[in-house]
Image (cartoon, rainbow, N blue to C red):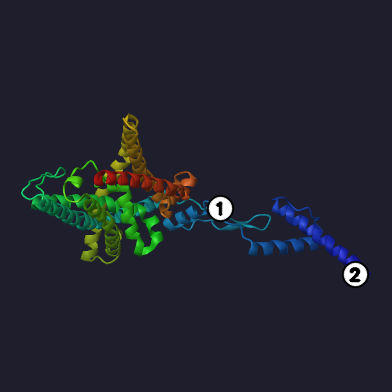
Amino acid sequence: MSGRPDHDAQRELETRLDAALDALNAEQPPRIEPDDAELWELLDTACLVRRLREPALPDDTFPQRIAAALATQLAPPGAGAHYSPNGRAEMTHLTPPPRWRRARAALALLAALMRSLTVVILAGMVAGIVAGGVGGRIAMYVAGQIFVREHPGEVAITESSGQVVGTFSWGGTVDLLFEGMFYGIIGGLLLLLLKPWLSRYGRRYAGLLFGLLLLAGAGTTVISSDNPDFARIGFPVLNVLMFAAIFVAFGPLVVAVERRVDRRMPELRLGGPWRPARLLGMLAVLVIGGLALLPLTMLVIAAPIQAGHFAIEMVRAEDLRDALTHAAGLLIFLTLAIGLPLARAARTPRLAAHLARYRIPAAFASGRYATAFDILLLLSLLAGGALLLSGVIDIVA
């Protein structure tokens, strides 16, 4: 019976300790007598153990604050962790950098953007010339030869280019190469925007997936029932397959070229060895990347106008099919011209940090917008695929 009082005292001490811990969890001061040294010592020990085993998770703005500190190479005073009364660690807010460091970070972002634009533009030009120019020339030659064999002695003029079917002309070939280069540049810019999504699938499948995405989203720009040459010259099914293969082949080709150019393109910064190759690369970044900023800025300005045009055409459509066609075009345009650049920025830590600094909503800067954009991208691809399938059916039928 002598151990009973000790056991009761221990139970009472545990009950009081639990009550003190519950009060701390509720962010309230514990109700402990100042002279109760034993209970205070036990409470300090419990807080120490909790601090080591159960640290508090960072808040939603923690990645942006860390990215901002890394981007500006800043070690702000007072940054670190402090402990609340319940013994949990909480992150302090980072001190914003001075204006000159913000300007330096903004210039570094601009230089990185110009370099990325230069890389994808050069890759898109090469892949566009090979896949679009040369591949398109081969597809047209095959279709023309089939037409000549099926209709000997008959002369036909293509509706798209005004060339004689089955003949070769250097002027038409050069025009086709430049056209392939132009569309290749657009494809390269789309690759830059889609890299965060394509990187999930590795090097082996990223290029093929990108080609299929281009075919679903932009295939109707080439494979369309509005162009009578698809059904009139050669075999319609073969024509559709050949021109669809151009989109699919462009994807792996531009991804491979982009990786090679990216490894060799120098950073746009001072310092380092001034070798001729590095100077030439920096000059290319300044010229190509700088010139690319102008049309991108114009696209941002013209995007709402073009979206309104799509909406007006959708309202004025005379039948349901035309209305659905313009609605799909509006969805695809909003996705590519507005949603995709914003989602790309949201998934780039350095850009997201600057967006958060200028009080862009946290849901956007933290990448939640980019997650919602995945659904929008899927819907636009489904809409583009439906338009492509409708055009293919009209051509074959």
Residue 10: quarter of image: bottom right
Question: Residue 203's x, y, as percent?
Answer: 35, 64
Decide if residue 362 is on the left or right side of residue 173: right
* Image position of 14 with respect to 289: above or below: below
For the C terminus, give its image quadrant. Answer: top left
* Image position of 366 with respect to 2: above or below: above
Give the tally of numbered discs: 2
Closer-to-camera residue (321/163): 321
Which residue in the protein does label 2 denote? 3
Decide if residue 165 is on the left or right side of residue 237: left
Closer-to-camera residue (194/112): 194
Q: Residue furthest bottom?
A: 2
Q: Residue at x 23, y 61 (%)?
A: 279
Task: State if disc 2 and disc 1 touch (CB < 8 Å).
Answer: no
* Image position of 172 with respect to 252: above or below: above
Decide if residue 94 is on the left or right side of residue 106: right
Local secondary structure at mark 1: loop
Circle 1 crowding by C-alpha within 10 Å: few under 14, some 14–19, many from 20: few
Which residue in the protein does label 1 denote? 59
Rounded to the nearest angstrom, the CA distance separating label 1 from label 2 is 49 Å
Question: Residue 47's x, y, as percent?
Answer: 69, 61
Question: Residue 388's x, y, as percent?
Answer: 30, 46
Residue 307 in sight here: no
Closer-to-camera residue (360/220): 220
Amino acid at dot 2: Gly
